[in-house]
């Protein structure tokens, strides 16, 4: 049951991240909290569209909204991102293994080239 | 243009990851490459449904398919995951800062408790 809830949470987080405007909103919120109007300002889309994106981020738990009078103050909530990052952890070894293999290859090439140059200088 | 292509790539990757069956397929492929039939075996859904999930993963660049006769051999391609991981990197400091703050708090509590215990033993 816990695993199922965690999985549904990951569905919502990855789905929320699958949009460039929502990723840009999150990025902006890492600088400072902001109202919906402030969030919308740099985007060439309607306030209504931004409001919908904010709602998707909120449902995924990535954004916290505090209502003060008529203003909605939003800030980033990193915990769901930490969970997505933990999911990614398992796959990290795959590209790390690849980079290790590349390093060995480059090192070998470099040594061969050096050897060649040393032989050249003897001639 | 490069940024735009990278962003569209991230859209496809995060969207592909927003499904528990697709995440489970990727996880299975980290153990060894497999045919579509082998991939489908543990899932209680139709071969057709699995085939569609495989196609979504393939379009996101997360899965490579090699056709040998009538069999489709699939393996994981970690590069797009590395890109998603790089995107996540920027946010990592947020929960790291939180964990640091928690560590300071626990340390302070621990010291206060120790002090209290020391005073207690003097009585």
Image (cartoon, coloured by chain):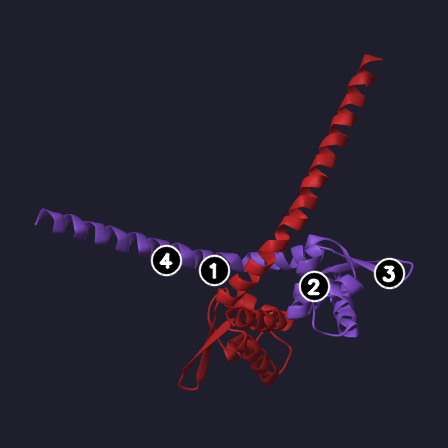
Chain colours: A purple, B red
* Mark 2 or mark 1, whichever is nearer to me: 2
Badge 3 element: strand
Are labels 1 and 3 on one chain?
yes
**Residue designated by label 3:** A71
Q: Are marks 4 and 3 in contact (CB under 8 Å)?
A: no
Are discs 4 and 2 located on one and the same chain? yes
Q: Nearer the viewer, mark 1 or mark 3?
A: 3
Whether residue B59 is visible: yes
CA separation, marks 2 and 1? Answer: 30 Å
The picture places residue B97, in percent across and down from the top left corner, at 67, 44
**What percent of the width, then of the height, locates residue A17?**
66, 67
- Residue B47, position as x, y percentages in the image: 58, 83
Residue that label 1 marks: A94
What whole-number distance in Å separates the C-alpha atoms at marks 1 and 3? 46 Å
Question: Is B43 left or right of A33, judged from the image as shown?
Answer: left
Please identify the quarter of the rendering in which residue A27 is found: bottom right
* Residue in front for this viewpoint, A14 or A57: A57
Q: Is residue A50 placed above or below A121 in the rendered structure? A: below
Q: In this view, does A8 lie above or below A110?
A: below
- Gap in Å between the C-alphas at discs 1 and 4? 13 Å
| Separation of residues labelled 4 and 3 (CA atoms) | 53 Å
> 10 Å neighbourhood of mark 4: few (<14), some, or many (≥20)?
few
Q: Nearer the viewer, mark 4 or mark 2?
A: 2
- Mark 1, secondary structure of its residue: helix
- Residue named by callout 4: A102
The disc, 4 or 3, on the residue closer to the chain's N-terminal end is 3
Q: Specify the farthest residue to the left.
A: A123
């Amino acid at each position: 049951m816990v695993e199922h809830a965690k999985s549904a949470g990951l569905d919502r987080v990855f789905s929320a991240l699958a949009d460039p405007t929502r990723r840009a909103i999150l990025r902006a919120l890492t600088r400072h909290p902001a109202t919906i109007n402030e969030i919308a300002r740099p985007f060439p889309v309607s306030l209504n569209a931004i409001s919908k994106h904010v709602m998707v981020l909120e449902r995924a738990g990535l954004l916290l909204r505090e209502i003060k009078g008529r203003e909605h103050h939003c800030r980033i909530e990193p915990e769901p991102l930490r969970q997505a990052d933990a999911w990614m952890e398992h796959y990290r070894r795959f590209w790390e293994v690849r980079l290790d293999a590349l390093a060995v290859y480059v090192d070998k090439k470099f040594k061969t080239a050096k050897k060649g140059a040393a032989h050249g200088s003897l001639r």
